[in-house]
Amino acid sequence: MSAPWFNENLFSWIPGTALGVLGGLWGGLAGTLAPRGRARGLVVGGCWALLAGSAVLLTLAVIALLTEQPWGVWYGLGLPGVLGLVVIGANMPSILRVYRAAEERKLAARDLTDAGAEKASPHLGESTLRAD
């Protein structure tokens, strides 16, 4: 067994806590902004960043397991990696679906507004004053 990468009794909680806090912030932003169709780049980019971070944690956990690191080292890295990939990955399609629905609502509202303007004034451009 090689020397531990870090003291698992003191530091194993940090990756899971960091991913949990960042995932909670992302979830709050996604739940607030996605139905409104706002900040799509931030929300979807944040999702990809969290998925990448989770994949890095899982990769480090596998490396730690293969190099015979203590249980607290590989488990402290692996659990948030697996949970992040599963939970955030499972929510990605629904977030994209909500953004598509918001875009469809915006286009439908624009179509209704344009159609309403044409019906309200059929003689757009004609003068309403009579030449008596």
Image (cartoon, rainbow, N blue to C red):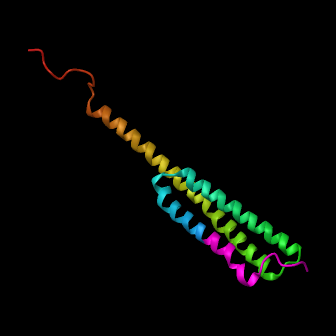
Q: Is residue 16 magenta?
A: yes
69 relative position to 90: left or right: right
Query: Residue 17, position in %: x, y?
Result: 63, 74
Identify the residue at image location x=79%, y=66%.
Answer: 59
Q: Nearer the viewer, residue 20 or 98?
A: 20
Identify the residue at image location x=53%, y=60%.
Answer: 30
Query: Residue 20, position in %: x, y?
Result: 61, 72
Secondary structure that dominates the magenta span: helix
Q: Nearer the viewer, residue 13 or 82?
A: 13
Identify the residue at image location x=59%, y=70%.
Answer: 21
Give the magenta range: 1-20
Q: How many marks?
A: 0
Q: Is residue 98 magenta?
A: no
114 relative position to 54: left or right: left
- The quadrant of the image that shows the N terminus is bottom right
Q: Nearer the viewer, residue 94 or 59?
A: 59
**Which residue in the rendered view is the most extreme toward the right?**
1
Question: Toward which corner of the image does residue 111 lie, by quadrant?
Answer: top left
Residue 24 against residue 126 in the figure, above or below: below
**Which residue in the rendered view is the most extreme toward the left?**
132
Residue 56 against residue 115 in the figure, above or below: below
3 relative position to 116: left or right: right
Query: Residue 26, position in %: x, y?
Result: 56, 63
**Which residue in the rendered view is the most extreme toward the top?**
132
